[in-house]
Image (cartoon, helix red, strand yellow):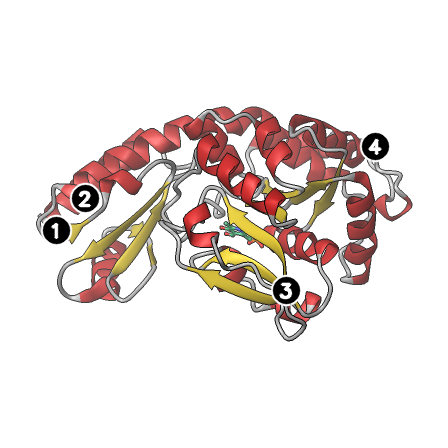
Amino acid sequence: MIDLRSDTITRPTQGMLEAMTNAAVGDDVFGEDPTVNAFQKKVAELFGKEAGLFVSSGTMGNQLGIKVHTEPGDEVLIDEKGHVFNYETGAASFLSGVQLNPLKGERGKLSVDVLKNRVRGLYEWEPRTKVICIENTTNKGGGVCYTEQELNGISEFATDHELIIHLDGARIWNAITASGVKPKFFGEIAETISVCFSKGLGAPVGSMLLGPEEKIRKARRLRKMMGGGMRQIGLLAAAADYALEKHWPLLEEDHRRAKAFAQTVSECSQLSIDLDSVETNIVIFDVKEGGAPAALAKLADQGIHMVQFGADTIRATFHFQVGDAELEKVIKTIKSLFR
Ligand SMILES: Cc1ncc(COP(=O)(O)O)c(C=O)c1O
């Protein structure tokens, strides 16, 4: 089976399991786990942030990020394709009592043009816009990255309007690899960043919220409140650290394979794709006739699994446990099924 449904389906490697076994651990609710403490410091420093908080998932990282910046009734501006808006169970309204205002950007990215005139709070009957939530890379937007120039524009806009930027960096590692933008730059433009180790990096569990000391302290209390206080968490931090050290360099290969696959899709008369949107490990394409479920079933018959992303739309996501031999099989199969 070749599983391209998501980059979250990878299994821990032998090396990762050994790193977990060898981790020094303690009770993190007491703040006594040396491995997680060191890892939080390391990742925070990488992004030029004061502090980091290991959390169970990207969703928890994003939701804590939103909660530490807002009060009930506040508004968060987000692209309509944003993960926080589409795939986090409406948590922002439940946990923070905020209103998400989904805006129509480009491939999941916001821009100054899109944000212009959307800030509210001047009149007492309006919601108070507080946060701009951006995502990099964009998942539903096809894995595209922001340029430094685009981010500078959003950052200036946020400063001018006294807004806080939260960055959903579930795949920030892919963005750094593909765009060459340095981690510290993201730390400069975003007050908080949520990063994931369990997507393309291949850790079984784990994300981190990064930000100023005071906000991370607040997030730590909220994490406990949400049942996210964990004990000998060094086991998971060791896996995440291993993933960062050993698997981050492999993302470049995922991007190369995704591009080769996308090129094949573009050459198939029964499929269509916006090749320019393929910048990292995610490939989103359309089936011209017959719909996505039928196409996915044909692929599944050949042992190849992708995921439905709309009535006619399919997403394939590359990760380090799909190599060149698997890519070759996928390319051959796509050509024969959808020529
Ligand atoms: C862009 C983005 N943000 C956040 C998340 C949430 O991560 P988790 O599934 O760990 O909650 C995902 C998950 O795929 C994602 O793609």
Near-viewer residue (78 or 203): 78
The numbered dot on residue 265 is: 2
| Mark-to-mark CA distance, 1 and 3 | 52 Å
Residue 1 visible to an observer of this rendering: no
Position above or below: 14 against 105: above
Earlier residue among tags 2 and 3: 3
Q: Position of residue 46 (x, y in %)?
A: 66, 26
Earlier residue among tags 4 and 2: 4
Q: Position of residue 90 (x, y in %)?
A: 57, 69
Camera-nearest label, 1 or 3: 3
Quadrant of res 235: top right
Give SS at disc 2: helix
Earlier residue among tags 1 and 2: 2
The numbered dot on residue 121 is: 3
For mark 3, does the 10 Å Cα neighbourhood hold few (<14), some (14 to 19), or many (20 or more) residues?
few
Camera-nearest label, 3 or 4: 3
Near-viewer residue (273 or 93): 93
| Residue to which mark 4 is pinned | 34
Earlier residue among tags 1 and 4: 4
Earlier residue among tags 3 and 4: 4
Type of amino acid at the residue the image marks with label 2: Val
| Mark-to-mark CA distance, 3 and 4 | 44 Å
Q: Is mark 2 within 8 Å of ligand 1?
A: no
| Residue to which mark 1 is pinned | 338
Q: Position of residue 73 (x, y in %)?
A: 68, 70
Earlier residue among tags 1 and 3: 3
